[in-house]
Amino acid sequence: MPVISTAGLARTFQTKHGPVEAVRGIDLTVSPGEILGFLGPNGAGKTTTLRMLTTLLPPTGGAATVAGHDLARDPAGVRRKIGYVAQSGGVDPSVSVREELVTQGRLYRLGKAEAAARAEELATELDLTELLDRKCGALSGGQRRRLDIAMGLTHRPVVLFLDEPSTGLDPGSRADLWDLIRKLRADHAMTVFLTTHYLDEAEALADRLVIVDNGTVVAEGTAAALKAEYGGSPDATLQDAFIAITGRGAAQPDAAPLAV
Amino acid sequence: MSNLLSDTGLIFGRYLRQALNSKVAVVFGLLQPMFYLVFFGPLLHDVPLGGEGDSWQVLVPGLLIQLGLFSAAFAGFGILLEKQFGVIERMRVTPVSRLALLLGRALKDVVQLLVQSLVLVIAGVALGLRAPVLGVVVGFVFVGLLTISLASLSYALAMRVDSPQGFAPVISTVNMPAMLLSGVLLPMALAPGWLDAVSRCVPFRYLVDAVRAAYVGDYAWDTVGLGALVGLALCAVSMTVGTRVFRKAGA
């Protein structure tokens, strides 16, 4: 039983210049306990897909089930089961770390005492205990990221969605973040759905990659399988495979004119 | 229902704490009506204003509505900031009641406006305002009604626009004529026929007239009653708009 399954999931935006098909039809499944890397060039539809799966944006076509709940019919059920960490995080810099963690618990309908206890517990697990009474704005980049993830874990979600989690982190913090994500899966059997621009990150962290371009899935498989299939040889880099898949592979109806 | 109440309480508490932490903003919000009270109020002392009561009973109700008009209408600025930090999206992926996200904020604005109004009235009394206590209380009720209406609209607008540049000009453009046409500074009883007619299309005018009537102890149907009717209608429309936007906003 997959944790996430989508069929033809699509989103068209109505703009002044006519409809824009940001996502044309995504079919994918994610198994329990899997770390899935969701890759694609800028504008491929990654963020739109993520926003649909996390209930922030209603799909205009297709269907999806997330953590046992139908995305279109029961978004509230989906929300109770998923954690979402946006690229920008989501804490107010003028509020203390403790207050944000406790408020987040309360937003997930924990009682006052429960929410306070959960905040302490999360702080211990994510090494934030010393920082609980600081303002969120006073944290370093790596500390902020740990707090953002702690906020997403408040209600022990079945699936954690991470949008470009390591953007802006120094190499040390990045390595720590990878360890943390692996630990979450090991300790809590959590399913992780992460988007990233960094191919090394995808290769190091994800069990399986799904590559999207022009709003549809263009390739999927383990990093090794993608390299072998698209990179031309088992020694090819993921970069080679990625360029082969999204560069030459994708249809380009508006290619450069033959003559000017 | 109990979730709505507890969620509203939670959101209310969060923003009330933030308001208490930024007392400077609360004080600055009061500065403009205070300046009018101290530097403009005395000028009206011997001017015939065409109604019952002295000049303070005319000016203070107007300033109360002006305070509500300006503070509540700009309430949405907070949401623009929170959108940039990602706070709004973070809350929208939790099970929290969408209506509570609006109500909790608007109620905090009501409390803040009532405190500011109280300070304004006390300053008025120090300068010479005399009005029945019941009338003053009725005035606060109108301030509350106006605040919850305008704050809801302001939050709804802030959810829909992407930048402060798309927000502030809209509010200023609506607010300035609304303030002048509702007779905040001088009663519309002084206006020529055409101006009076235009001002009757501005709902805030009825609130100003109602509070002025209450301040001279007149609680008649055609003043306080009419004001209450317009205020409640405004509130119903604004809350409907606000709720709809919060239920489905793509912020």
Image (cartoon, helix red, strand yellow):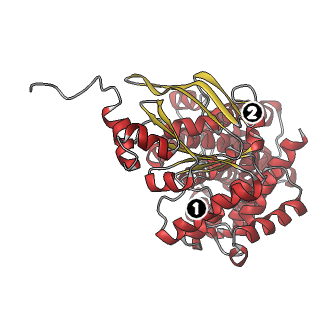
For the residue pair A28 and A215, the one nearer the viewer reads as A28
Residue drawn at (69%, 72%), measured in percent from left and top? A128
Q: Residues within 10 Å of mark 1 (few under 14, many from 20)?
A: some
Q: Which residue is mark 2?
A: A1
Alpha carbon separation for disc pair 1 and 2: 26 Å
Q: Could you tell whether A202 is left or right of B227 in the image?
A: left
For marks 1 and 2 on the same chain, the one whose residue lies earlier in the sequence: 2
Residue farthest front in this picture = A234
What secondary structure is found at the residue carrying circle 2?
Answer: loop
The subunit carrying tag 2 is A
Q: Could you tell whether A178 is left or right of A235 in the image?
A: right
Q: Which residue is mark 1?
A: A178
Residue drawn at (80%, 48%), measured in percent from left and top? B8
Residue drawn at (50%, 51%), measured in percent from left and top? A202
Q: Which quadrant is home to the C terminus of chain B?
A: top right
Against A75, is B69 above or below? below
Query: Contact (CB < 8 A) between labels 1 and 2?
Result: no
Q: Could you tell whether A1 is left or right of A146 in the image?
A: right
Q: Is residue B250 visible?
A: no
Q: Which quadrant is home to the N terminus of chain B?
A: top right
**Three-letter amino acid code at the position of disc 1:** Trp
Nearer to us: label 1 or label 2: 2
